[in-house]
Image: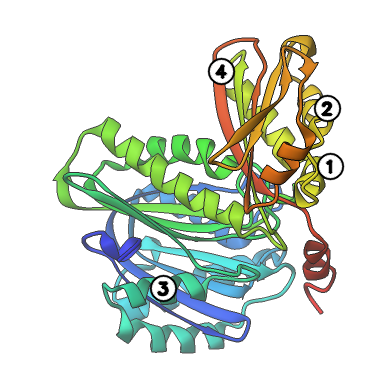
Amino acid sequence: MKSICGVEGVTAWGLKEGKFGLALIRAEGEAAGVFTSNLMKAPPVSLMEERIRGGVLSAVMANSGCANAYTGARGYRDAAEMAEICAEVMHVTPEEVGVASTGVIGRYLDLPLIRDQCKRVAPNLARSEEAEVRAARAIMTTDITEKHALVRCENFSVGGITKGSGMIAPNMGTMLAFIYTDAEVPAPALREALKAAARRTFNRVVVDGDMSTNDIALCTATGKAGRVNPREFSQALEECCRMLAIQIAEDGEGASKLLEVTVKGAPGEEEAATVAKTVVGSPLVKTAVYGADPNWGRVIAAAGRAGVEFDPDCVNLWMGNGTESVPLVESGEIVVDLARAKALMKGKKVLFVLDLAAGDGEATAWGCDLTEKYVEINGRYTT
């Protein structure tokens, strides 16, 4: 097993019928969540922001094909009914059911379909690789592949599945993430660990710069492995979220290359993150990456508009593919070997490392190139 079913106390299943899918995950324990900061939050987000304060989840139900966003009071009632449908079938209380939706904005849920799918999914709940694959596929929309991560430590595990491909930008993107651990973690500590992990991973992915209405990441601790070292748990949770975040970037809508930008020498970590996200989100940088064009000037220009103070005449910039790298700028001087740099950009991964020489802050952000396929996908998304 490679994700959630590798965690003690977790069972799952899902189905996908055309554009409409449904995933169920059963796991009882302390729980926490992080959510989109978009003002136009979808009703499932509003509902879960309220209910997660109880700090406990017994099950999660997620549907794809309809976002149940911008649906007003009816949408909120429908989200609550989703929880009731799941609770009835799973024999738990509605207040301990996590619900999430993804798909087209401005359309109402087909509750009869969701009820029917729930009744067909629930009897198949299992702890197997097939189960986690089916659950991950059920929540996909424009994703090409399902996304899994599992971090095994000596005494516990952290696993997760996610979906996300387009409408991806800080803070969080059009993503649903369901993360599980068998470590025993109190809800307040779980909440802080998840917030910190999301800040350094999910919140540093930029595919297209559009922030979603439906982002939800839920984490449940079943406690089956007992108490663990809090720092070790936080590190494992962050690593799991990072693995998922990179898979989202790799599967960006229309993407042909993963783009990774590391900024060093910033005044602080948050300043480094701001610059990294600005560079990785630049359409000019993204198109240059697509065309294997080592246009270092676009990287420097994007960094310069990020609102972070540094001396452009002191920066250093490298570019590589994860195996090899070449310098582009040294102490503000252009040193690029264009032919070699272009050759390194022709693979599936392009990395930039930018040293601002202005402090000790460091951070990494992830994204992808911008291709014609992105326009094709989103030009006909609802039709």
Q: CA distance from mark 3 to mark 2?
A: 42 Å
Query: In the image, which is nearer the foreground, mark 1 or mark 3?
Result: 1
Q: Please say if 302 is above or below 382.
A: above
Q: Residue under label 4, please give it.
A: 361
SS for callout 4 = strand
Quadrant in which the N terminus is drawn: bottom left
Q: Residue under label 1, please give it.
A: 284
Mark 4: which amino acid? Answer: Gly
Q: Residue under label 2, please give it.
A: 301
Q: Residue under label 3, please give it.
A: 133
Mark 1: which amino acid? Answer: Leu
Label 1 Cα crowd, 10 Å radius (few <14 / some 14-19 / many 20+): some
Mark 3: which amino acid? Answer: Val
Q: Position of residue 50 (x, y in %)?
A: 49, 51
Query: In the image, which is nearer the foreground, mark 1 or mark 4?
Result: 1
Q: Quadrant of residue 261 in the image?
A: top right
SS for callout 1 = helix
**Mark 1 or mark 3, which has the lower sequence index?**
3
146 relative to 38 in the view: left or right: left
Query: In the image, which is nearer the foreground, mark 3 or mark 2?
Result: 2
Q: Are marks 3 and 2 in contact (CB under 8 Å)?
A: no
Q: Please say if 251 is above or below 318.
A: below
**Mark 1 or mark 4, which has the lower sequence index?**
1
Q: Are marks 2 and 1 in contact (CB under 8 Å)?
A: yes
